[in-house]
Each structure stands twice: as C-alpha cells, then as structure tokens.
C-alpha cells in the first residue's frame, strides 16, 4: 500500500484539510481528513479528482491547426469535415496509434485521467476491412495502455452518409459497417481492452444521419448495460435535414423513438429547444459538451445554464483535440454562456463559485457518461488524482474554491503538477514520464503524413 498526503483536497463532501489517502492496487482504500502524514507518505499541497474526457477523436490531434485557412467559399463544419476525411484517408494503423498516444499524453498532462474514445476508423486506407476487424481498436487500446490513461472505448456504428439511408461517400469508407460486422467489432473491442484495469466498452451510433431507425434498434440490442454515445443536433443543417426526413428535430425524434436514460451521452446537443432540454434533463442523459471544438467549428452554443437549472448534468470532452485542456474546456463553456446572456458567472446559478460548479458538474457527468461507478476521491474509487502546483503565482494566497476559480480563469498555463491514473503516477512536475519518446514517434509520423 502507498500513502498520499494533501494539505487540502476536494472530496465529494467538499474541501478538506490534512487529507491522507491510502492506495492499493489502483484503488483508494482509505481517505481520511484531519489526519497526520505517516512515514513514507508522498506529500502534496493541493489534490483534485482527475477529470474524465468524455469525447475524443484522438487521430484528429494530428491535424490540429491545419484547417485554419479560409477557403474560396464560406467555411463551416462541413468544409472542415471534407479536409478531415482527406487527412484520415492517408493514415496507417501505426500513424493512428502514434497520434492517439500523443493526444493521451497531453490529456494526462492537462488533468484528464480517463478518455471516452469515440472510435470510428475501422478499415484500411482503401476502405477494406483488416483481416482482424479489431485492428484499430487494438491500436487505440495500446496507446491508452502505454500512456496510462483510463479508457472507455466506444466503437462507432456508421453506415450512411445522410438521413434516409443515403449511400456512404468515398471519404467515409474507412468508417462503414453493417449490423453483423459491427457486432464482431464490438466483441473485438472488448477483447482489445480485456487486460486494462477499469477499461469500459460501450457503443456509439455515430449520429441519426449515419444510422437508420432499424439499425439503431438492432445495435442497441448488442449491449444493454454499457454507455451509449451519439452525436446529435450539432449543426443547424443537421436539424434541417432531420426535419425534412422525419418531420421532427433530431433530439425530439430520438426521445420519441428510443428509451433514452442515464446510459446515454448526447454529444453536443447544441441546437436543443427548451422542451428538448427539459426532456434531456428528465431522462438523466449526460450532455457531452466540447466547448473548444464547438467554437472552433462554429457549431453554436449549448444552453448550459437553462439545462443545469432543469437539473441536467453535463461533462466535457476534447473532441477534435485542436487544443487539449481541462481548464480550456471549462472556461470556454462559461464564457460562451456569458456572451449569450451578457452576464457573468452564469453556469454557477445561485452557487458561490463558478469554478467549483463547472468542475464538479463535469466530474459527475463525465464519470456517468464513461461508465465510472464511483467518481471522485472516495474509498473504492480508482486512484485518479491531480495535484496542482501550489507555488505558482496564480494560486498565491488561494484556498478552497478560489483554487478552482483561479486555475480555470486566472492561470496563463497549466498548473498540473502530478497525475495518478488508476494508481499509476504518470505525470511528475507537469511532464508525462514517456513524453519525449511518444512525441518523437508522433513527430516522425506527422512529418511523413504531411510530406506525402
């Protein structure tokens, strides 16, 4: 067993001082406030729960910054998507693994300790299936294992280019499966993560435009217990096309045709009406918000304030991984609400600390969405812990909620000092233990890709 001692730590019941934690085989077996440090304990000043990243397309980290050039027509999510298709079309399995590892290192250094990998590349560069249908799922699992991040693997069912059973486009050929082949992929994904402590496998119908109602019904029968994630109502065009196809908006169609419950994570849900926000909150589903990517793609702004007022829970994800940071996502979320409402401290509602509400809500929602039964710093939970650099000037004189407010809104760089993921210390002094090796491989792969 190993002991950790924090001068102050954020526990489920709130901030506590002189907190001693006992670690055994990746789990917390003892958490005591008002305790004394014991000989051999590792000592730190500030301890926080690790944050879940509930939505990632890891391979897109390789194209960060490469789409910020104006085209000859108005740029949008849809023009960005065409560029993404061209990029992924050139990636080998080795490339995908190397880029995923780099993304996961950066997540850990930012304070994310588990990732929900919305994994939709399944075939080779020609669109033909690998002889091992789980080849790329195994590459994602290998990258997560090498870096030490907790993994919730979400193999994606993707069959069509648009509403009404439209045939896939050429750029989508690497993503496509039927129900039978997806069933085999799901089993292969479970085998891929079988050796990783705490790994979870769910499933992810990509979107209503990529799956028919019959296919959606069929794939939901393949897993009745794990998380279910879906992109929905991200774009106005998507809403308009769904109305033309069904006479209903995407979220309304989903609630009328599927039993949405706490297993579900509704990714983006940007263009939700007031009634849809009510239904989301009442269902217990998590709103999977990716504020940095949603801003980068020009998606729009989710009404997080109204959703939370209705009792809804959200989590945060890094999605396109154009920028990876716990504080970046939380800050962008709050600032988007301030710009919408022309007010300050919007998400906090009647609570005192905006940082505390943002952090704890995202921890709760992200954990639920990724299948983590016991989140936070409590007995029985995985040892997913972040310590902050209390010596940084941004935290001078701060304690309690002021730490979160200053970290999220007032720090010019990451204040993450150390990170433990499932009991394994993977970040020390702000640097992942394998940072240089993984970055070298990433650099070599990217240089090859971009020179091709």
Image (cartoon, rainbow, N blue to C red):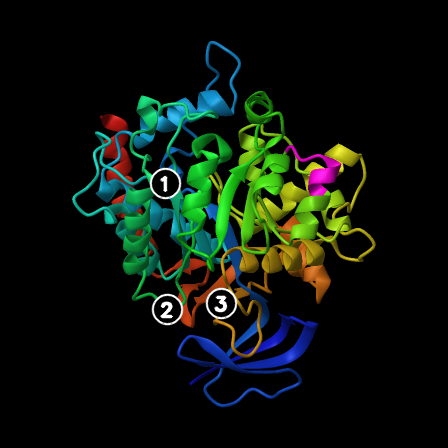
Residues packed near mark 3 inside 10 Å, few (<14), some (14 to 19) or many (20 plus): many
Q: Indicate the secondary structure of the residue bearing disc 1.
A: loop
Q: Is residue 410 visible?
A: no
Q: Earlier in the sequence, mark 2 or mark 1?
A: 1
**Could you tell me residue 169's position as x and y percent?**
35, 22
Is the residue 286 above or below the residue 37 in the image? above
From which residue to which does the magenta span run?
271-277
Write down the quadrant of residue 427 in the picture: bottom left
Is label 2 or label 3 in front?
2
Q: Which residue is mark 2?
A: 197
Q: Residue at 32% across / 38% down in the picture?
A: 178
Q: Nearer the viewer, residue 11 or 327?
A: 11
- Which quadrant holds the C terminus? top left
Is label 2 or label 1 in front?
1
- Measured Cα–Cα span from mark 1 to mark 3: 27 Å
Is residue 39 toward the left or the right of residue 300 in the image? left
Q: Which residue is mark 1?
A: 120
- Which quadrant holds the N terminus? bottom left
Q: Nearer the viewer, residue 64 or 358?
A: 358
Q: Earlier in the sequence, mark 1 or mark 3?
A: 1
Q: Earlier in the sequence, mark 2 or mark 3?
A: 2
Callouts 1 and 3 close, C-beta under 8 Å: no
Is residue 27 toward the left or the right of residue 135 in the image? right
Residue at the right extreme of this rendering:
350
Q: Is residue 274 magenta?
A: yes
Q: Residue 384, labelled with which disc?
A: 3
- Measured Cα–Cα span from mark 2 to mark 1: 23 Å
Q: Is residue 86 magenta?
A: no
Is the residue 402 above or below the residue 342 in the image? below
């Amino acid at each position: 067993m190993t002991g950790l001692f924090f001068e102050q730590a954020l526990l489920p019941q709130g901030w506590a001082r002189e907190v001693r934690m006992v670690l055994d085989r990746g789990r917390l077996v003892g958490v005591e406030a008002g305790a004394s440090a014991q000989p051999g304990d590792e000592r730190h000043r500030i301890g926080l729960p690790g944050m879940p990243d509930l939505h990632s397309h890891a391979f897109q980290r390789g194209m960060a910054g490469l789409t910020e050039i104006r085209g000859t027509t108005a740029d949008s999510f849809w023009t960005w998507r065409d560029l993404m298709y061209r990029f992924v079309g050139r990636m080998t399995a080795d490339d995908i693994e190397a880029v995923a590892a780099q993304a996961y290192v950066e997540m850990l250094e930012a304070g994310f300790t588990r990732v929900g990998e919305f994994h939709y590349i399944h075939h080779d560069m020609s669109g033909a299936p690998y002889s091992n249908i789980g080849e790329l799922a195994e590459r994602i699992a290998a990258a997560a294992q090498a870096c030490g991040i907790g993994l919730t693997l979400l193999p994606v069912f993707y069959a069509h280019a648009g509403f009404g059973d439209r045939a896939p486009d050429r750029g989508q050929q690497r993503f496509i499966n039927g129900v039978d082949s997806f069933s085999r992929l799901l089993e292969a994904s479970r085998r891929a993560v079988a050796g990783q402590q705490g790994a979870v496998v769910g499933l992810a119908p990509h979107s209503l435009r990529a799956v028919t109602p019959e296919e959606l019904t069929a794939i939901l029968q393949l897993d009745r217990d794990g998380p279910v994630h879906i992109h929905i109502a991200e774009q106005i065009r998507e809403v308009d096309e769904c109305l033309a196809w069904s006479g209903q908006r995407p979220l309304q169609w989903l609630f009328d045709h599927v039993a949405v419950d706490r297993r579900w994570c509704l990714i983006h849900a940007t263009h939700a009406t007031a009634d849809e926000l009510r239904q989301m909150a009442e269902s217990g589903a998590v709103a999977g918000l990716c504020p940095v990517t949603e801003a980068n793609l020009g998606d729009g702004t989710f009404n997080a304030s109204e959703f939370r007022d209705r009792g809804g829970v959200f989590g945060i994800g890094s999605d396109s991984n154009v920028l990876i940071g716990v504080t970046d996502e939380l800050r962008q979320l709050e600032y988007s609400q301030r710009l919408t409402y022309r007010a300050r401290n919007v998400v906090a509602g009647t609570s005192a600390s905006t940082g505390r509400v943002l952090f704890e809500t995202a921890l709760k929602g992200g954990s639920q969405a990724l299948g983590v039964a016991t989140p936070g710093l409590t007995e029985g939970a995985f040892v997913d812990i972040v310590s902050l650099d209390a010596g940084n000037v941004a935290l001078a004189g701060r304690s309690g909620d002021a730490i979160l407010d200053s970290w999220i809104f007032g720090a010019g760089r990451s204040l993450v000092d150390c990170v433990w993921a499932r009991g394994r210390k993977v970040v020390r002094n702000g640097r992942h233990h394998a940072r240089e090796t993984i970055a070298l491989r990433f650099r070599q792969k990217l240089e090859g890709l971009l020179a091709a």
